[in-house]
Image (cartoon, grey):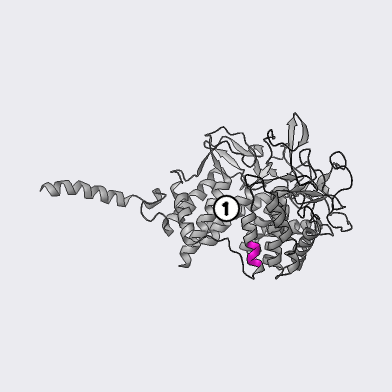
Amino acid sequence: MLRQSIGLPFLLCLTLAMLISYEDRLVSAAEIDSKENVSLAMRKSSEYFRNDLAVQGGYVYYYSLDLRERWGEGKAGPDQIWVQPPGTPTVGLAYLAAYRATGDSFYLDAATDAALALVYGQLKSGGWTNSIDFNPKSKLTAEYRNGKGRGRNHSTLDDGITQSAIRLLIHVDQAHQFRNQKIHEAAEIALNALLAAQFPVGAFPQVWTEPVQKVEPRKGNFPDYDWRTEGRIKNYWDYYTLNDGSAGYVTRALIEAYEIYQDPRYQQAVLKLGDFLIASQLPQPQPAWAQQYNYEMQPIWARRFEPPAVTGGETQDVIETLMKIYQFSGGDEKYLEPIPQALAWLKKSQLPNGQLARYYELKTNRPLYMTRSGKNYSLTYDDADLPRHYGWKIKSKLPQLQREYNLLKAGKQPSTKASQRELSAQVKTILKNLDPQARWISTSTGERLVGQPKFPVNRKYIASEVFSENLQTLSTYLQLLNAD
C-alpha cells in the first residue's frame, strides 16, 4: 500500500507532464536536435521575428528587448528599414532557406513581404540606398521608383546593398515561378541597371544614377605623383571600386541571376568582372589590389581616412572571387593566374599577430594607419592611437585561400559544407539558446558591431544577423535530416 500511495501521485504528475501541449515547449529535453524540435524552433522564432519586429515586411539590424528602440546605421526611424546587410535581404533570404527546407508557405509569405518592402524602396536609378522609409514626409526617404519618396537617386554597391536586394528579389521571383508581377519587374529593372553600371573594363562604380561612361581599359599601375597630397577626387564613388567586398557581392548576385534566368548577359558580366580583377592587380613589389581606382587604373583616395594603398581585405575578396569565377567559367585558367603572387604577398604582409593591415603603403608595403584630431586625419605608421570608428586590422584568411587554390589546381572542388555531426553540435547550441519568447538574445561585450551602435557592455539586444544565421543553419540541418 505504501508503494502504491507513493507511486500514484508520481504517475499522475508524469501523465500531466506528458499531456502538456508540445507547442508550448520550444525544445524537448531528449533528442534536442530532432526534426520536430528543429521545425518547431524555426517556426516559433520566425513567427516572433515576422509578427513582432517587421515594419512593412522589412527589418533593421538590432532591437532592444522591449522593442522600443531599433538600430541600423544609427538609430532607425519608426517607419525605416535597412537594405544593407544584415537587414531586410538577409532576413528574407533566411526565410527562403526555411521555405526550401520545410515547404511551409508561411516562410515564403514572410520572404515575399521582405521582397515587396524592397520593391517599395527601389530607386528610379534601379538599385537601392542603405535604407527605406515608408513615411513619404520623412527626410529619410530617397527618390523611389514608386514616386513616394524624395531625395537622392544614388544606387549603391557599397557594403553589398543593391547586390543583396537583387539576390532576395530574384530568389523570391523564382519561388513564385516568375508570376509575382511586382517582384519580377523590380528584379528585371535592377539587373538591367546593374549591367548598365558596368564599365567596359569590367569594373563597377560604388554608386550610380545613370549608365556609366565609356572609358578605355588599362592595367593596374602605381601613381607617378605624390599620392599623399595629390589626386584627391571628390566624386570617388564614380570610379572603379573594390571596397568592402564589392567584387564578391556583385559576382554572387550575377551568377545566381544567370542560374535563375539563363540570360547570357549575366554570364558575360561575370567574366568581364573577372577580366577587370586580372587587369587591376598591381605590379611587383605588391601584386595585390587596391580599394579604389581612377580611370588610369591607379589607387586613389576615397574618404579622408581611406588613402590610396594596397588593401588586405579587398585583396582577399578578389582572390575568393577569382576562384569563384574560375569555377563559373568552366575552368578558364586565366582567372587563377594572378593568385599565387597575391597569396605570396598576403603571406609576407601578415602582422606579427597574424592579422592583416587594412592598408599598406604603395611600393614600400609598410602597414599604413591614421590618427584623428576632430575631423582631421593624418597618415602614420604607428598603430597606437587608431580611430575607433573604422577597422584598421582584419583577419587573415590565408590558410583557407591557399587550401582552396590548391584544390582547384588539383582539379578538385572545394567544399565549405559542415558535416552532419558538426551541424548537430551547432543546432543543439542554437536550440538551447532560444529563450521562452522564441528569441535569440545577444549580449554586448563592447565589440565593434555592424552599424557601430554604442551599446554598453552587457547590454542585451536582438540581432537580425543572429536570427538569420541560426535560421539558415537550422534549415540546412533539417534538409539533411529529411534526406536520411
Amino acid type at mark 1: Ala
Graded by Cα atoms within 10 Å as few (under 14), some (14 to 19) or many (20 or more), the crowding at tag 1 reads many
Numbered disc total? 1
**Is-magenta flag for residue 405?**
yes
Q: Quadrant location of residue 95?
A: bottom right
Look at the picture and state if 257 lies above or below 305.
below
Image quadrant in which the C terminus is located: bottom left
Q: Which residue is mark 1?
A: 110
Instruction: Give 127 or 133, whichever is nearer the viewer.
Output: 127
Percent of width and height locating residue 162: 71, 51
Instruction: Give 425 or 251, whichever is nearer the viewer.
Output: 425
Per the rendered image, the range of residues in magenta is: 404-408
Look at the picture and state if 114 lies above or below 265.
above
Percent of width and height locating residue 28: 38, 52
Percent of width and height locating residue 306: 77, 41
Q: Quadrant location of residue 327?
A: bottom right
